[in-house]
Image: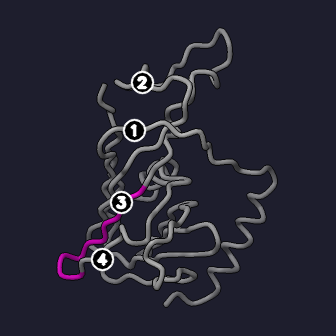
Amino acid sequence: MATQGLKLIARDAEDLSVVASCLQDALVPLNEMKYLPAERRFILLVNRFRWEKPRADMIPAGQKQTDASFEDDGDYPNAHQRIHTGLCIDRVLSVRSRGIDRSKPDQFLNLLTIRFDADKLDFVFAGGGIIQLEVEALSLFMQDLGESWPTQWRPQHEDGLSAAKDAAIKKRDSEPIR
């Protein structure tokens, strides 16, 4: 059965918060990112964890799943899922990064969140990496591609680390992005 994937557009910070929540914990191969300056476009392909698709055994007994249904509800009822997802950001003026070793194109980055402030769009990764796009205006398109597949690995987030993560992000923000 084919996967009914997500298609989202972000034109403002509110839209972006929805996209960022869907992309939290996406695995991003460094070699699957490309800046096309002539087109003023930045594209990337990620391996997205499907947070919107809980395992059947994670729904409390006696409670029906009230989320929107997906065509593949019966494919992997007791497995977490991942899916390839493409992102296209238009109106990009420049791209900079910090804390990412671009000499290792085969590495995978773990996306924590995406932030937008004025004319800067930041992709924030675990381990301190940031890719910052300077944009004329926010214009992001996200679309799931192909079919999802089962995974036994569900991203884990320890309690109490949010404040520490926020402090680390603020500290990193004070460092220049090259």
Q: Tell me if label 1 and label 2 are in contact, CB under 8 Å.
A: yes
- Element under label 4? strand
Above or below, comparing residue 30 to residue 112 in the picture = below
Kindly identify which residue carries mark 4: 35
Q: For the residue carrying disc 3, how many other residues have a C-alpha within 10 Å: few (<14), some (14-19), or many (20+)?
A: many
Write down the quadrant of residue 79 in the picture.
top right
- Element under label 3? strand
Q: Is residue 110 left or right of residue 90?
A: right
Q: Is residue 150 left or right of residue 87?
A: right
Q: Is residue 123 inside the magenta stretch?
A: no
Residue 75 tag number:
2
Region of the chain picked out in magenta, as a range: 37-46
The amino acid sitting under disc 2 is: Asp
The earlier-in-sequence mark between 1 and 2 is 2
Determine the CA span between mark 3 and mark 4.
12 Å
Kindly identify which residue carries mark 3: 45
Of the pair 23 and 170, the residue shown nearer to us: 23
The earlier-in-sequence mark between 3 and 2 is 3
The earlier-in-sequence mark between 4 and 1 is 4
The amino acid sitting under disc 1 is: Ser
Q: Residue at x 44, y 75 (%)?
A: 120
Q: Nearer the viewer, mark 4 or mark 1?
A: 1
